[in-house]
Each structure stands twice: as C-alpha cells, then as structure tokens.
Amino acid sequence: MDESGNIRSSKISPRRLINLCGLIALIVTVLLVASLTWSKDEFKLAGLSRPIEIVRDRHAVPHVYAQTVDDAYFALGFLHAQDRLWQMDLNRRAGSGRLAEIFGSDALEQDRFFRTLGLRRAADANFQQLDSATRASLDAYAKGVNTYLSQDHFLPVEYYLLGAKFEPWNPVDSLVWLKTMAWRLSGNWWEELLNLRIRKRLSPQQFADLFPPYPGDASLVFPDMPGLYERFDGLAGRLLAQHHEEINKSVGSNNWVVDGSRSASGKPLLANDPHMPLTAPSLWYFAHLHAPGLDAIGATLPGVPGIALGRNQQVAWSFTNTGPDTQDIFLEKILSGQPTRYLTVDGSQAFKEIPEIIQVKDAADELLTVRISKHGPLISDVDTDAKTATPDGMVAALSWVGLEADDATIRFMLNAGRAQTAGELKQTARDFHAPQQNIVYADAGGNIGMVAAGRVPLRTASNDIKGRLPVPGWDPKYDWQGFIPFEQLPQRDGSADGRIITANQKITAPDYPYFITSGWALPYRAERIAELLDKSDKHNVASFAAIQADVGNPVAEQLLPYLLKIETSDQTVPAIQLLRVWDKRMSAQAAQPLIFAEWLRQLAAVLYQDKLGDLYELVGDYNPQFLANIFNDRDGGATRWCVAAALSVPPCQQEMQRALSQALINLKQHYGDDMKQWRWGRAHVTVFKHQPFGQAPVIGSLFNVETESPGGMDTINVSGYRYDEASGRYFGEAGPAFRAIYDLAEPDNSVFILGTGQSGSPFSPHYRDMVTAWLQGGAVPMLTSRERILRDAVEHITLSPE
C-alpha cells in the first residue's frame, strides 16, 4: 500500500456519505462536547491480572509500562482502539472485502476483488502456522481492543454518520491489515496489463524510449507471442479501468545511516522518512512500550501489535520499499469441454472453488465463487464484465508472494524491538516476508547495515519475460522456483565509506545473479542525499533534519540546460528569465517551481498524449528520464517523438516552445498575469485525506488536513502530487507520512514527526497539531527516559484488574 487509502473514494457516491447531513449538527455538537469532557484516569478491566501504567506526553504519545510483553501489546490494542478505532476498522474491512456492508453497492467492485484475491484467507492460514508465542501476542492485542470497546463511551463520529457498528477485533484482523499494507506496497501486476495494451500503440523502439531502463541497464525487449496477448487486450482494459487509482502512486521512501566516522558523536545516526499516501489520520501512530525484555519506541500501525519502525536503547531500524516484482499474471488454458479443469505441465488439474458471500448494505447478499489455479486466484472472475472480456477457453490467475500460507512477517513486528545488536536485528529480518523492504539499521556498538528482507520469486534463466507481461501458465519455464534465499538477498554489513543510502534506487551490483525488478526508482533522491552527506565531515541530528527537508530539484538540474536553449517569444521571455536565475529549489514562496512543473506536464502531453490516447492517464505526465533521453537524442529517440529540425537546432525545440506557451496560458488562467506573484505553495497543496469523508461536500474540510507546501516529485522532501484540471492545483497526495532520526550515541536525542497528529478524531487538538512542524522540517523528541517522560507528562492512565 486505491494504493493510498482504505477505499477507492471515487467509487463511493457523495450522496451515500452525506445522506445524514440533517443530523450532522446534532452529532457534531454531542460528540465534540463528549470528546472534550469525557476522560478517565483509571480503568478496572476484567481479565487483566496485572496493572498497566500509561503516561501520555504533551504530543499525545503514550508510554506504556507493563509487567509482561503481552500486557504491553494488550495496552497498545487498548490505545489504538481509543485513538484510531475507525481507521483500523476500515482497514480490516478493506482487506477482508467487507466495505459494501457499510457503503453499499458502490463498494462492491473493490470487495469482489479483495474476496477474489483472498487476503483474509491467507491471513487465516498464516495464523494457523504461527508459533504459540506469536499467537498469544496477537490474542493479547485483540483482547486490548475489545476490552476498550466494552467500556462505556462514544464511538468515533464516522460510525454515527454511516450508521455502522463495530464488530469485536479478531487476532486474524491484525494479519489482514498487515497483508493489505503489503499488497499496497507490492508490484507489478497492473504494469503487466498496461504493458500488454501499450505494445499495440507503440513501436518497440518507442516503448523502449517511453519506459527507459535504469541508468546503465539494457533496454527492455519483449518476446513476441503471436495471437496470445491480442486476445487479452479487452480483459486488460477492464482490469486497468477498475484499478486505475492504484497506478502512478508515489510510494517510496528515504533512509540513510552513517557510522561513527561520519558523526559528531562517534556513534551511528540513522534517518528514515517512509513515503506513503497521505491520510488523515496518519497511517502511523507513535508509542513507547516498556516491559521486561522490551523498551522500544517508534511507529506502530493501528490494528497491528508491535513497533514497526523505531528504536530501543541499543538498536534502531528503518524501511524503504525495495520495489520488487513479486506478482505475476499467469494465463491459464481451460480444457475443451471441461470448464472446471485447466492445462498444466503435468496434465490437467481442477480449479479449487471457494464460495464467498458479500453482504451489501440496503441490498441482497451477493454470492461470489472464487476459483483458484496452482498459480493463484483467477482475477478474470472478479465480475461479469471481466468474465465477458476474457477470451473463450482462457482465464487469468494472479501469483503474489504475500498469499503464501507460511508468511511470518508479524514476527518481525513483535520481535524487532527486542534486538540488542545489529546482528540480532538482521536475524529477526528473516521473518520479514512481504513486502520486501530495505531495512537499514544501526546499533550503539557502532555497527551499521542493510538487508533487503522479503520474499522475491526465483525465476528461471529461460524466463524471458521477467514479470513484465502476463505469461502462459502451461509453460514450465515461467513457473517460480521458490524464493531468493535470505543469504543471497542484497545486504551490507558495514560500509567502507561510512554510510548506507537507500531511496528506492537500484541496490544490486551488475553481477548480482538474481532478478528482483526492472522497475527500480531512478536515483535522483539517493544521489542528492549522498551529495548533501558529503558536504559535511561530521553529522548530527540537526544536519540530518536539514537533509530530510531539502527541496533541491535534481530533475531541474538535469533538464533545464536543454529547456533554456529554446528560442523565446514576447510571451515566454519573462518565464525564461525567471528560470535562468532559479536556484532549482522547489520552494513554496517561489514562482519558478510552478513554471517548471507545468512546463514538464505540458511537455508530456505534447510528446505522447496523442500516441497513447486513453492510456495516457495510466502512464502519467511525469517522466523526466524519458525527456532527458529525447532531448539528448539517445539512440535516435528524438526523431520518433519530435518533428525533424535543422542540424544546427537542438532536438525537440518546437515541442518545448509549444509546451511552454501552453503552460503559461494555463498558469495565467489560474494565477493571474503577473508571474512574479505566482507561488508554488499556492498551487501545490498537500492533502491528508480522510476516508471516506474527505470527499464529502461541506464536511470534507473538517476531516481533511490541507496545507501549502514545498517539495516535488524527486526532491528528498518528496511530494507525489496529482494535477487537478478544474482548479489548476497540484495536490500532494503522497509523501513522508512520518520522519524520524535516531541517535545511537544518546537515544533520547532521537526525534520524529507525523504529518498530522496522534488522534483519529477531527475534534481532538491532536488530530492536526503536528502538521506545522512537519511542514517546516521540525520534530518532537522520542523519549524513553522515564524521568524526562514524567516531566513532560500531561495524562496518567492506569489499567487495573477488576
């Protein structure tokens, strides 16, 4: 992890969200008063054998003191339910395919897909194979959630607006949400479908231009399978239409670590800012858990026990998405006259069939029969339209590593906080199965390291498609041969230059023997981080924070030398003059970032919108490496995309001029004629979107959190923005959902910040109280010292046996 939220918001009719508007004033008033006045400092709880102390600081971060680790997880479940109940409930419903129960038929399409995919079935299987200690921790967490719900209190406002009810939390629900997160961060099934369709629109050379390889890698070459892919074009179009909101989401991350040779303290420093779709409340919830054998603080996922990202007194760890290709679509051939059987290398085999009943609000239940081949569930069965679009005698199955029955990723979440050395942390990462993450870590002994932990399919040497197109399921050369062994995953123990950087760039050497992906993120952020690290001999928390906030634009450094060579007109001279003196920073107060961003957007439209037609939106309007290659006429690419020009004229001048003229017309329409009054921050607005009420008329502004902001698509302080044609604004919908810096010399010097706040209630002062600090690159301390915690305490809660 559409990728960003819990539901595909565009599918939900606003009428369904506001049909209770006549009651909103009453509900808001009652709940606002209740949220401000209802509180308790002690809870007498049945089934609890030992007291638990909870201390909240002024940022609403809870510090849990328990006498056993499972009691700490009980308390975390209690706190998650208290602060984020609606969020965790919606997430388990999304992954379980149960949104239609509260949203009605608008959510049926998504429910059908997730029932077909079977995250809930996989989570059930995982739970059965977990060891007893892990199951006990999941049980303790679920018990904490349900114990909170057994108390007298109001439910979150969303339940009243929708007329929904909360069902008791089940330990498997935690695994469903963890698996849903893994799904959203995995790839690349929809790219296979998109590639299948684009091959009909472009020549092989144009395809190679538009989707350039990672710098230094060979261009993609697709084998030809005459007659096969043409038959699946309709199904590919149907599935892409259903899942278009999952495409072009900027989901990446930054992390880097330096050892003592490059820090002022002589001990490691570690920075992390996971880039995720931005939501209100935040995806993350900070907490400190203290129990015998556990003293960890960091980011938790509401709905899941354990510290996902964070530190203890000896070790800190962080994630970025590796971006592996862990999904393949297999085309299965049905036996003639036997619709329940399909062809395999060993003969025929029967589909496994599983009935799924989907309950629909204000409508009859729907029966969905899920069919599963040896490769996975049949995504061509998701609905009648998909079945109709599927060619006779064929179906399409989806394989994904996250559906394996022995997935043990939850064990990493529960045990990472107990590691006392870098080596122990790395060993814990053996349990991290999905999604593959670049886990960068450090310990107080001075050790730093990285392991790209997670399951990646082993594909045969004869597999010439390598996950870029659907493959024949009856051909054994495309079957997975297990997973890359943990010992052979990309990893580093220490670093000769005292630093390790991952920012979704390629992390394998040229001689690495295994295929991980052909879709590495370009190294813009990684190279910029390295550049800034090299500007100082010794780093501290403040210098790391400055790097996290950096908005220098490496794409501008790359492309402006070409763009500024155009022949100007009276209309374009002022813009070119501004760009010539630009510092190439995506600053909120500057006009140049707006001109540059719109120029690139218009260039994409000029160069390939007509060629792609209805696929243009799926490919997207941001492709800087393509532009750089065309402007440089790499492999003669300019002649395939631009009109021919005189030899003395640089390539694509006419297209650059046309795009800039259109960009300025568009900007003047939205922001006035005076360029000097334009500001990137006015146009570029970061939106932390609430699900589902962020899209609702009138009340959306109560639930959403919006702020003008700096940053861009490839700056370190990244913004995955989406252009809105109606308003002319660039809505930042993905970015650093939280930032953290860990100081291994003095752990209490570590800091973090969320994009919004700790609370899930829009009426709480802690719903959006961190947004200003997040915007300005600020942070709050990550304290585990009891003395300092008590000095900063604003609330004490005791959970006592009844």
Image: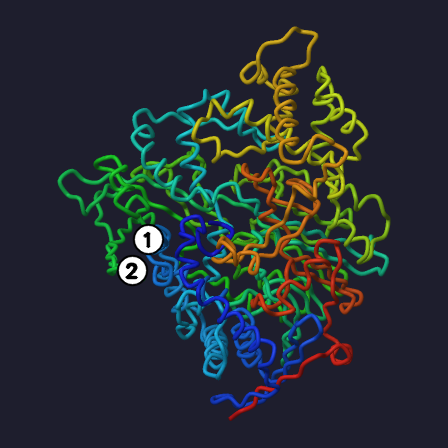
Look at the numbered disc 1 and give the secondary structure of its residue.
Answer: helix
The residue drawn where x is 86% and y is 49% is 537
Q: In this view, does 164 lie above or below 259?
A: below
Task: Work out whether residue 765 or residue 330 is closer to the camera in this orientation and state it.
Answer: 765
Q: Is residue 303 left or right of residue 239?
A: right
Look at the numbered disc 2 and give the secondary structure of its residue.
Answer: strand
Task: Work out whether residue 462 or residue 627 is closer to the camera in this orientation and state it.
Answer: 627
Q: Is residue 151 left or right of residue 563?
A: left
The residue drawn where x is 49% and y is 56% is 181
Q: Position of residue 712 (x, y in %)?
A: 67, 41
Q: Which amino acid does label 1 sit on?
A: Arg
Q: Where is residue 188 in the image (x, y as percent from the top left)?
A: 46, 42
Using the rendered view, name the quadrant where residue 471 is placed. Answer: top left
Circle 1 packing at 10 Å, graded few (<14), some (14-19), many (20+), is many
**Marks 2 and 1 close (CB-CB < 8 Å):** yes
Residue farthest along the bottom direction in this orientation: 802
Q: Is residue 564 above or below residue 591?
A: above
Q: Position of residue 543 (x, y in %)?
A: 81, 53
* Residue 724 in view here: yes
Q: What is the CA distance from the residue labelled 2 to the residue labelled 1? A: 8 Å
Q: Name the residue under label 1.
A: 112
Q: Mark 2 points at which residue?
A: 358
Circle 2 packing at 10 Å, graded few (<14), some (14-19), many (20+), is many
Q: Where is residue 277 in the image (x, y as percent from the top left)?
A: 56, 51
Q: Which amino acid does label 2 sit on?
A: Ile
The residue drawn where x is 46% and y is 21% is 204
* Residue 292 in view here: no
Using the rendered view, name the quadrant where residue 385 is placed. Answer: top left
